[in-house]
Image: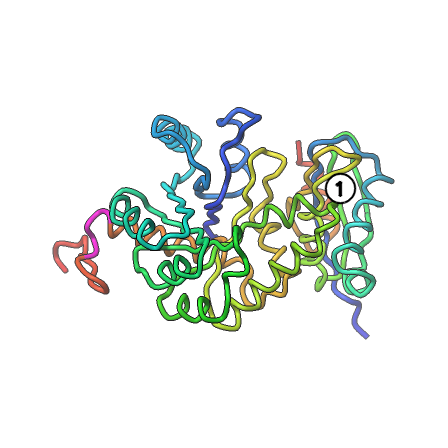
Amino acid sequence: MRRPKRRYLIFKVSGYLLNTKDVSNLLLTSLLKCYGIKGYTEALPHLVKFDEAKQAGILMCAHKGVVLIRSSLALTSSFKGRRIRLETVKVTGTLRKALRILCSLQ
Amino acid sequence: MSRKFYDVGLKYPSTCDTRSFLEEVKRLGYKGLAFASQASPNEVGKIAEVCREVGLDYVNRLDIVSSSASHIKALLRRYRLEVELIVVHPLSVEAARLAARDSRVDLLNFQERPELFEATEAKMMAAHNRMLEINLRNMMLRIDEPDYLKIVRVYRRMISLSQAFKVKLVISSGASSPLELRRPRDLASILHLLGFEGDIYDPLSKNPFMIIETNRAKLSGKIAMRGVWISDNEEA
């Protein structure tokens, strides 16, 4: 049996300094709010890495869930009453490439 | 070939510097933009100049908000040869139907009175190749408000009706500050949540570009009459 295809989303946070736990909660809450448990099982997101200095990270998901994750990130507009933005910088097929892009981010 | 993304429904930045706002638009991957709100001619000239310096394509847009068909006609007569994009926000059935069949109108926006967008209007828009503009600002920024589900319902209804009658869509962010802006592919992915079927990137790239390109050709005299384009090539 073939392993399900994965995608790695490199994302960036602007407007507020978040820690790994905040980001993880924010992503999960946003996905559940927009698509519910069905959407969660379709996307199966997992926060691989979050660089608190760069405020950027890598999120792994199923390849069919990329658009779900993208839209839930786009719909996240505030955190603790402050305006924030979560943007998808790039989508890759391998973790190695994702890490390379994350390292090159300023 | 990479896509050219246009956000044709931005708002003038009220709190931040215009240049930093425009640089952020460019950084996020847009090729061009248009502002939906009103501004004085001096301000428009200044913004167009900054856009040129930053490397963005500035589209001159006019918004007509009216309930009177005769008022809309008068404004169309006055401004059609000056602006590149005309958007009508109808406030009555009469105005909506006039805008749906008048060839001088490019886009219709029913955000002010969503209940006016019915099957009849959608059918007329499809028959006359008018496009529907959907501004996703409320969808993005009012997610924590109690009436959010009502907002989602309105958007979903508009999209399903437009898809049923094959009315083309143009989406915009309505952003007025850098943090309200979204990357084009992120913005387009919201359409997936609203039940849009088809290429989600067309409403942000192909559809606005088609209108802008045609209108610029018309204004520069490259279109002699409907369907007749004057070729640049002298040998042809």
Residue A69 sits above or below residue A86 on the image: below
Q: Amino acid at mark 1?
A: Gly
Q: Position of residue B225 (x, y in %)?
A: 19, 60
Q: Position of residue B177 (x, y in %)?
A: 58, 33
Q: Secondary structure at mark 1?
A: strand
Q: Which residue occupies 30% across, 60% down? A: B103
Q: Position of residue A29 (x, y in %)?
A: 82, 50
For the N terminus of chain A, the image quarter is bottom right
Q: Is residue B222 magenta?
A: yes
- Mark 1 crowdedness (10 Å alpha carbons): few <14, some 14-19, many ≥20: many
Pick the front one: B203 or A20:
B203
- Give the left or right position of residue B217, taking residue B46 as reference: left
Residue B208 sits above or below residue B29 on the image: below
According to the image, what is the colour scheme of the structure?
Answer: rainbow
Name the chief secondary structure element in magenta. loop
For the C terminus of chain A, the image quarter is top right
Pick the front one: B30 or B41:
B41
Pick the front one: B229 or B145:
B145
- Give the left or right position of residue A50, taking residue B134 as reference: right
Q: Which residue occupies 43% across, 37% down? A: B56
The chain that hosts pointer 1 is A
Q: Position of residue B96 (x, y in %)?
A: 42, 59
Residue A86 sits above or below residue B206 on the image: above
- Give the left or right position of residue B179, taking residue B117 as reference: right
Pick the front one: A85 or B38:
B38
Q: Which residue occupies 50% across, 61% down? A: B116
| Residue position for label 1 | A57
The span shown in magenta is B219-223
The image quadrant of residue B199 is bottom right
